Image: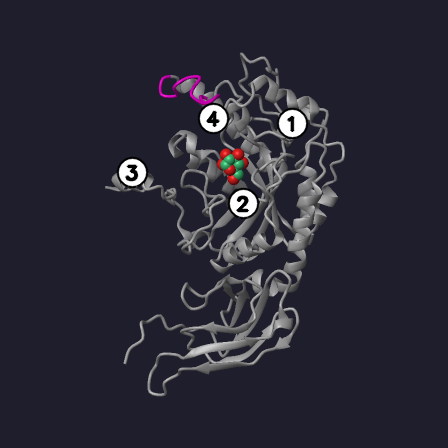
Amino acid sequence: MRWSLVVLLGLVGLPLVAQQRVEPASIAGKMQWFQDAKLGIFIHWGIYSVNGVDESWSFYNKKMPYAEYMKQLEGFTASKYDPTAWADLIQRSGAKYAVITTKHHDGVAMYATRATPNVGHYKWSLPGPLSVELASPAGRDVVAPLFTELRKRDLKCGAYYSLIDWTDHAYPAFIKDSVRYDIRKDARRWKRFLTYYQAQIDEIATQLNPDLWWFDGDWEHSAKEWEAPKVRASILKRNPQAIINGRLQGYGDYQTPEQNIPVERPDSPWWELCMTINDNWGWQPQDTNYKSTHDLIAIFADVVSHGGNLLLDIGPREDGTIPPRQVQVLEELGQWNAKHGEAIFGSRAGLPNGHYYGPSTLSADSTTLYLFLPHGGCGSVEVKGLHNKVLSAEVLGLSMPLKHRVVGKISWSSVPGLLFIDVPQEASDPWMTVLKVKLDGPVRLYRGEGGY
Ligand code: GLC
């Protein structure tokens, strides 16, 4: 039955949510900071930034030969890498956490690995660990210094780690349309890979102790094949507070829709939309299709309105500089956040669809409602089905009090009237205006169909 449903959903093109094996109530405590955080910065940094090609996928998808891809190691310098400046920028954007690639599907570690891969018959075969520290001019671990700087600023640290390793000789997949071997026929070879990748997880846990583990690539194998329960248990044994994203075949804590904005509010209390700032995860100079600050604020408001987080991705260059366009967007986002932070950070999902035609959030105690006004909104803003009395309404960041009124309330009926708040033109924020509406108590909503 379940499988037929899965097949059916697959056919109609709906995303399949990995079955959650983690009980939400059991993790609520450790998820608190994540739920409050709302904004994280995702950083895809790797040797792919040397030629500006698709991260790992470029050789997998045969856009370039593997050897040429790996040759980028020789050009990865990190010569202007300034983790202090990175952490400052992340903080200025308003983000509360960052997630950086510790190893992408290409198998190149960005941190100081000493685990021995099972490399064999490729031109680029290294006798020992594969990392930018040991095999590129950068000559150093580029993750640890960023974690240090983030922690100085009280920002949480996330480690992206791809389970996939298309370089390792004991990993079955390599280039699209071909596999090295079948793990059902050579369990010992697969075991060698499991040993390798789990050794890397141990290293990352010991050296970096991430607050958040951002796994990727779980789709290539089942939970059983990855030994997902064991990996989850070993991470939590070392750090019971560690959060694990939802890409561990059902053994993670929260969902990670990618690029696709949910239209309906996700069921899960915790979710995070990961999204690129242009069209690619890593640095690609020809990709100038940047989302504007307006676009990103609209997306961000929509995400927080539905109780989620936005994990906004940037792609630094090989020398460690962050392209000016990316810096500009983060800074502008930061300016908007500084003015409207009260409506965002620590907030909860806003009104369900139908009450207000725009994004909204609620304070954690749900006695304050924040209305986001898209399209440079002014005029009469309408809210339906609100039982509460409004104590006050103002423009956030300007402390400008606003007139409000209720119309259509029938004295003998329990159905609430319509709330109108009058917003003058001069209240408009250049990106998106936010109203703060104080209620007489926790929000109470009417969800019915009217009547007589
Ligand atoms: C996808 C891509 C990967 C990227 C990730 C970020 O899984 O395969 O390249 O790092 O998305 O979410």
> Regarding mark 3 in the picture, which secondary structure is present there?
helix
Residue kind at label 2, given as amino acid type: Met
* Residue that sits furthest to the left in the current view: 1
Q: Residue type at mark 4: give it.
A: Leu
**In front: mark 1 or mark 3?**
1
Could you tell me the amino acid type at mark 3?
Val
Task: Determine whether 185 is above or below 264 in the image.
Answer: above
Q: Residue at x 66, y 61 (%)?
A: 338
> Which secondary structure lies at badge 2?
strand
Which residue in the protein does label 2 denote? Answer: 275
Q: Earlier in the sequence, mark 2 or mark 3?
A: 3
- The answer to which of 428 and 259 lies nearer the viewer is 428
Q: Decide if residue 350 is on the left or right side of residue 283.
A: left
Question: Does residue 84 appear left or right of residue 196 in this picture?
Answer: right
Mark on residue 449? none
Helix, strand or loop at label 4? It is helix
Residue 339 rendering spot, x and y as whole percentages:
65, 64
Query: Magenta residues?
Result: 172-185
Q: Earlier in the sequence, mark 4 or mark 3?
A: 3
Question: Quarter holding the N terminus?
Answer: top left
Query: Considering the numbered disc 1 on the image, is that residue within a helix, a strand or a loop?
Result: helix
How far apart marks 1 and 3 lie (CA) works out to 39 Å
Q: What numbered label is drawn on residue 194?
A: 4
The residue under label 3 is: 7
- Residue closest to the eye, 344 or 300: 300
Q: Do callouts 1 and 2 mark residues in contact (Cβ within 8 Å)?
A: no
Instruction: Give the residue pinned by disc 1.
Output: 51
Q: CA distance from mark 2 to mark 3?
A: 27 Å
Instruction: Looking at the picture, tell me which residue is in the foreground, 441 or 262.
Output: 262
